[in-house]
Amino acid sequence: MSLKQTLKLAKQLESRANKSEDSLNNTANLSALKDETKPRNHVAFNPLLKKGGVHEKDNIEAVRKKKRRETKKILRQKDWLSEI
């Protein structure tokens, strides 16, 4: 085996060793990230922070669609059998 081939083989072995070390570090980092997940922000679900109100668009079609949706919802919730 020539010197050139020996050096090439040594570089290949070093790169394999570095890759295996990196993969071990990556798996350790992933498991650490799973442990440090952020809790859900419950303030974001506050109804005061949702769209609408003063900042609602004046789009006529959107307003009509919203009213229709609300009336359909009310009609679905109504107990029609109690009316008889």
Image (spheres, helix red, strand yellow):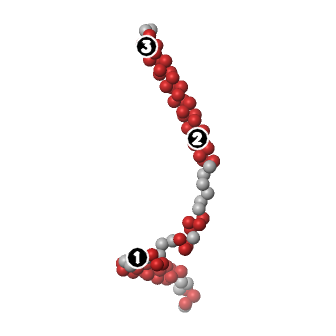
Calculate the distance from the C-alpha at mark 3 to the C-alpha at mark 2.
36 Å
* Kind of residue at disc 1: Lys
Q: Quadrant of the C terminus?
A: bottom right
Calculate the distance from the C-alpha at mark 1 to the C-alpha at mark 3.
72 Å
Task: Classify 55 as above or below 1.
Answer: below
* Kind of residue at disc 3: Gln
Q: Which residue is mark 1?
A: 57
Q: Position of residue 38 (x, y in %)?
A: 60, 54
Mark nearer the N terminus (2 vs 1): 2
Mark nearer the N terminus (1 vs 3): 3
Residue 39 relative to residue 62: left or right: right
Label 3, residues with CA under 10 Å away: few <14, some 14-19, many ≥20: few
Q: Residue 63's image quarter?
A: bottom left
Residue 29: which disc?
2
Q: Residue furthest right?
A: 35
Residue 7: which disc?
none
Q: Residue at x 44, y 17 (%)?
A: 8
Q: Residue at x 53, y 71 (%)?
A: 49
The secondary element bearing badge 1 is classed as: loop
Residue 65 seen by the camera = no
Task: Classify 60 as above or below 29.
Answer: below
Q: Which residue is mark 3?
A: 5
Label 1, residues with CA under 10 Å away: few <14, some 14-19, many ≥20: few
